[in-house]
Image (cartoon, helix red, strand yellow):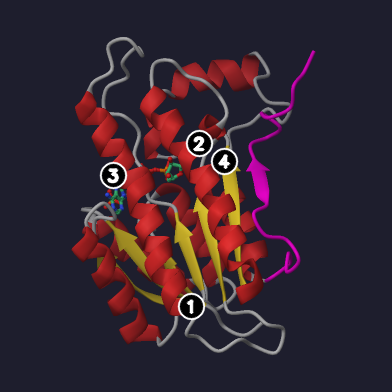
Amino acid sequence: MATKTALITGGSRGIGRGIALELAATGARIAVNYAGNAAAAAATVADVKAAGGDGFAIQGDVAVAADRERLVAETLARFGRIDVLVNNAGVAPQVRADLLEAGEESFDRLFAINLKGPFFLAQAVARRMLQQERDAEGFRGRIVNITSISAYTASINRGDYCMVKAGLAMMTKLFADRLGNEGINVYEIRPGVIATDMTAGVKEKYDRLILEQGLTPIRRWGQPSDVGRAVRAIVEDRFPFSTGAVFDVDGGFHLHRL
Ligand code: NAP
């Protein structure tokens, strides 16, 4: 596989970092985006280099148009092309509120970061990918959207999060359709419960649900590397005739069981 270049939003910590480290093992060159945690981003870049890849850290809020433009421009300035966009950056609601109490502030924040940002970043990167040469197999680029089991699981104390993830799932289908004949495949990865800073505050609850009550057939927490390995398979082009595909990286959470 030729060395790929990737822009990973929210690559500094958690799942994004796990993706960066897996791609680094393929020799990838990676733009590690972060929102505010420069130290975490620098540590990820150092680990990417140690794992055999290359990269740089780049601050930018995906909810802000000028930041998105800068992310694309700087990645191109460094690497000359963008082979892979991973729309990973995302936030959970700061306060979990019942559907009948939920406020507009949280709604607007989640829609801006988790859906509007990925949409317009995918749009900007796709436009650029369309100008890139295809390789011998017709590859121009790949776009990967990190959604969640919340895309189809109702949690009435964080409806905003569920709605944006459902929107991101539809966004995957839309871009997959639009770009399918252009050498740009688009994929959705739906992680289950993954051990990151995002889930640190609910550790005991999920320890109980997963380890004692068997919430998932595979009775363990997911790790960032579980998601990273799925993205790596996509970047290594293991699914060239698949687009719009959904990968459940969730220990079997999505199964209906009786
Ligand atoms: P995390 O540990 O909280 O890390 C979030 C990452 O996103 C950080 O790198 C953070 O940068 C970055 N970020 C936050 N807001 C941003 C913004 N406005 N612009 C750019 N970057 C921003 O979260 P995670 O658990 O790894 O989650 C990553 C993705 O997976 C999210 O989309 C989340 O919804 C999804 N997901 C997570 C789980 C789970 O169980 N953890 C399950 C399903 C789906 P800084 O380091 O600078 O703060």
Label 1, label 3: how many angstroms apart (C-alpha)? 24 Å
Label 2, label 3: how many angstroms apart (C-alpha)? 14 Å
Q: Determine crowd level at label 4: few under 14, some 14-19, many 20+ residues with C-alpha closer than 10 A.
A: many
**The residue at label 4 has a CB less than 8 Å from ligand 1:** yes
**Which of pointers 4 and 2 lies earlier in the amino acid sequence?**
2
Q: Picture coordinates of residue 54 (x, y %)?
A: 43, 78
Residue 51, placed above or below residue 136: above
Q: Which residue is at 23% across, 60% downward? A: 65
**Which of pointers 1 and 3 lies earlier in the amino acid sequence?**
3
**Which of pointers 4 and 1 lies earlier in the amino acid sequence?**
1
Q: Picture coordinates of residue 143 (x, y %)?
A: 53, 63
**Which of pointers 2 and 3 lies earlier in the amino acid sequence?**
3
Label 4, label 2: how many angstroms apart (C-alpha)? 13 Å
Residue 52 horizontal side relative to residue 135, left or right: left
Q: Determine crowd level at label 1: few under 14, some 14-19, many 20+ residues with C-alpha closer than 10 A.
A: many
Give the SS element for disc 4. strand
Which residue type does callout 3 highlight? Ala
Q: Please give the residue where the numbered disc 1 appears in the rendered image.
A: 129
Instruction: Identify the disc placed on residue 112.
Output: 3
Does any portion of residue 182 appear in the rendered image? yes
Q: Which residue is at 54% across, 21% downward? A: 207
Instruction: Identify the disc placed on residue 191.
Output: 4
- The magenta span reads 237-258
* Ligand 1 quarter of the rendering: top left
Query: Which quarter of the picture shows residue 93?
Result: top left
Label 2, label 1: how many angstroms apart (C-alpha)? 25 Å
**The residue at label 2 has a CB less than 8 Å from ligand 1:** no
| Residue closer to the observer: 53 or 6 | 6
Query: Which quarter of the picture shows residue 190?
Result: top right
Q: Which residue is at 23% across, 21% downward? A: 103
Q: Please give the residue where the numbered disc 2 appears in the rendered image.
A: 166
